[in-house]
Amino acid sequence: MPAFLHRLGRLAFRRRRRMLALWLALVAAAVVCMTAFGGTGKLDNTFSIPGSESQRALDRMKTDFPTFSGTSAQIVFTATDGQKVTDPADSARIRAALGAAASAPQVAKVVSPFDAHTISADGTTAVAQVRYEVPQSALEPNALDELKSAVAGANQQGMRVDVGGSAFGNAPSESHRSDIIGVGVALVILTLTFGSLLTAGIPVVTALFGVATAIFGALSLTGTVSISSTAQSLALMIGLAVGIDYALFIVSRHRFHLAHGMEPEESAALAVGTAGSAVVFAGLTVVIAMTGLTVVGIPYLTAMGLAAAGAVLIAVLVATTLLPAILGFAGTRLTPGPGSRAMRREQAVGGAGEDAVGATGDSLASATGENVLSGTGDNVAGGTGESVASRTGEIVAGGTGEHVVSRTGEHVAGAGANAAERWFRLVTRRPLLTLVAVVASLGALAWPAHDMRLALPDNGTAPKSSSQRIAFDRVGEKLGPGFNGPLLVLADTSHSSDPTTATQRVAATIGALPDVATVGKPVANPATHTALIQVIPDSAPSDPATKTLVNSIRDDRAAILRDTGATVQVTGSTAVSVDVATKLNSALIPFAAVVIGLSLLLLLLVFRSLVVPLKAAAGFLLSIAATLGAVVGVFQLGHLGNLIGVDTTGPVSSFLPIILLAVLFGLAMDYEVFLVSRMRESYLHTGNPLGAVHSGARHSGRVVTAAALIMTSVFAAFLTSDSTMLKQIAFALAAGVLLDAFVIRMTFVPAVLALTRHAAWWLPKWLERRLPDLDIEGDRLGPAPAVPESVALTPSTAD
């Protein structure tokens, strides 16, 4: 792969105009296809589970009870100023509003609160039902706005009208502000990292190319494939984050080569062949994990997984084709200026990278490259007299204190060490203590996850000022929380001797169950011998007691069949939510096992070590557990939720754990590969395990840190979304990347490698012979550029 990518990078560099034209044509084609075949107006936010009981019942209701089979809205009338909705003037106003609502687009039926007896006990609140024969996704773009306008006439002195219900749930969320914030923060971090606005702008530009292609391409499919607004936002979020990060890794390597005198064409080709190989590997792990979400069998989740996988795949293609073309246009302008902070930093990394001493003390170079220790280390002084070694080799210090080597040659500390290397030296000084601290802190953060409740979001977590949230709260307060999520029981009485009596007995049996507030009058269809029974729970839709009630009705179906001859199925939005959570819970453990197993296999192939994959898997589990604990703490328990606009607590989205597993797995592999591969390279060259850990920090720590900060910032920017599900996903990914990059990869990983030392890189000979050599770092492409003798490598004070 490195050789192929090296040739591809060189080709893109040389044919840069054609490559740029090709990508511009791809973006234009995606825009044309979106305009012709799809668009945001055709996004489908409907939850469905093919084959589940709730879905089978909904499918049958489309023919037996079409007015109940679609979505529904609630019109909540509230009398103010001491009035009641039953007062003649108010009731007349309500009836007039309901008449206007009946003529709104796509409305199938309006159920008056005076007929359904959905009036609060104090007479101040009345709730009307508006039924549609189509799901929420099939509503016309202005259907709900027209409904609001139709009833606005009742919103006068003494009367307040709010419109809500399931038709408003899971509505699309505008995310353009998040895009701008994320890109802006990323540009600032990149500018600080490279010290050049031109260099910083290249990853942003290429990422935007990839995101535009992915999003416009996905939207072009909405006319034929169900794609939700959350899937679109997830693809945008992940595509933007990985697009910038992947370009950052390659541009950073390219800039390092330029700083050491390499020609731009060869530098770009080598950067794509080396760093690009790791980008391809890391990207494919994300693609595999996200594509794996399709096996769960939930269309909503499948669309999210495939949309995100497509965005990542396009980001990889952009990084390996368009990016080297852009580097060709930039030419030598990306080379750090002589004497600049960026040049000193790049050269300090290059010069320091070769000063590690092996266990035998064979070689040690000073910052000027002038001083070399002999094999015995007895007495070596550079031309400047800056370095002196004792006979035991215990101390080798320049006049400036640049180098200190332990007796085994394992510690080489320089005043020019960057912040990442200094941090690695700190955490590896007492590695066991570091591990205990990491595990204890992440364990404490993960503890709330043991009480995690999963459910689909409802209007109870909508923005506090929104109409649907006000309606939800008002209904729950005045009529009971169960009115916000009624259950629908479909009874098939075709095998009953007396269908009417059987239906009544079914209703009575269900009404006697715990947590049932009321059972509505059954609606029968004599032609199909079916009846529909509305059940109002005592508890809210997301309450665990409601899930228990759904399961209780289903558990009693055998007794109902025996007593009445009728078969029953439970459906409705609340039952669909229960079924989604149940299916996702059952799929979570197998999916996690596959992800962990895949990480072990991939890292075994890449690093040819047993300890490295096991360490990575353990760290991944720690970061996942801690992230879920943080999510529960913020969204379910309400800790610090006001800082990110969470004004009410509620359950965690059912989709979040499995999405977090898939996404964080791939992103964790990014940092693992880029950080540990440099450690392995150094260990193979020097045989010094601790020095290899420090070398990895020196070469990759700054880039990994910048990449993690960029990705965290992009995800955190989406916390401004009005969608609770997207807000939770954004928080989980931002927290997950932050914990995995800085606590696991930058702290836990070096501590484990320092503790295990040579054993960290051991692999049984029989296994080593059987494993293919993936050469992710492109060692066979040739050595990294040597530092020109004419360049003085002065210690950097950067970082």
Image (cartoon, rainbow, N blue to C red):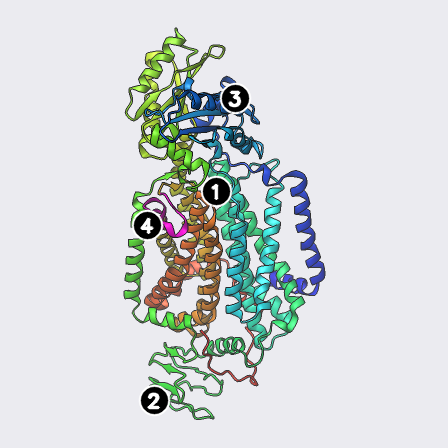
Look at mark 1 in the image and give the residue it sits on: 293
Dot 3 or dot 4: first in sequence order is 3
Give the residue type at disc 1.
Leu
Q: Residue placed at 39% from the left, 59% from the top?
A: 610
Residue 59 seen in the current view: no
275 or 64: nearer the viewer: 64
| Rendered location of residue 650, percent (x, y) | 36, 41
Q: Is residue 141 above or below residue 326?
A: above
Disc 1 to disc 2, C-alpha distance: 62 Å
Look at mark 4 in the image and give the residue it sits on: 639
| Rendered location of residue 509, percent (x, y) | 31, 17
The circle on residue 358 is none
Q: Is residue 662 above or below residue 207?
A: above
Q: Nearer the viewer, mark 4 or mark 2?
A: 4
Dot 1 or dot 4: first in sequence order is 1
Q: Nearer the viewer, mark 3 or mark 2?
A: 3
| Rendered location of residue 253, percent (x, y) | 55, 68
The circle on residue 99 is 3
Disc 3 to disc 2, C-alpha distance: 100 Å
Q: Nearer the viewer, mark 1 or mark 4?
A: 4
Dot 4 or dot 2: first in sequence order is 2
Disc 3 to disc 4, C-alpha distance: 45 Å
Where does the magenta region start and end? Answer: 631-648
Give the residue type at disc 4.
His
Q: Nearer the viewer, mark 3 or mark 4?
A: 3
Dot 1 or dot 3: first in sequence order is 3
643 or 438: nearer the viewer: 643
Give the residue type at disc 3.
Gly
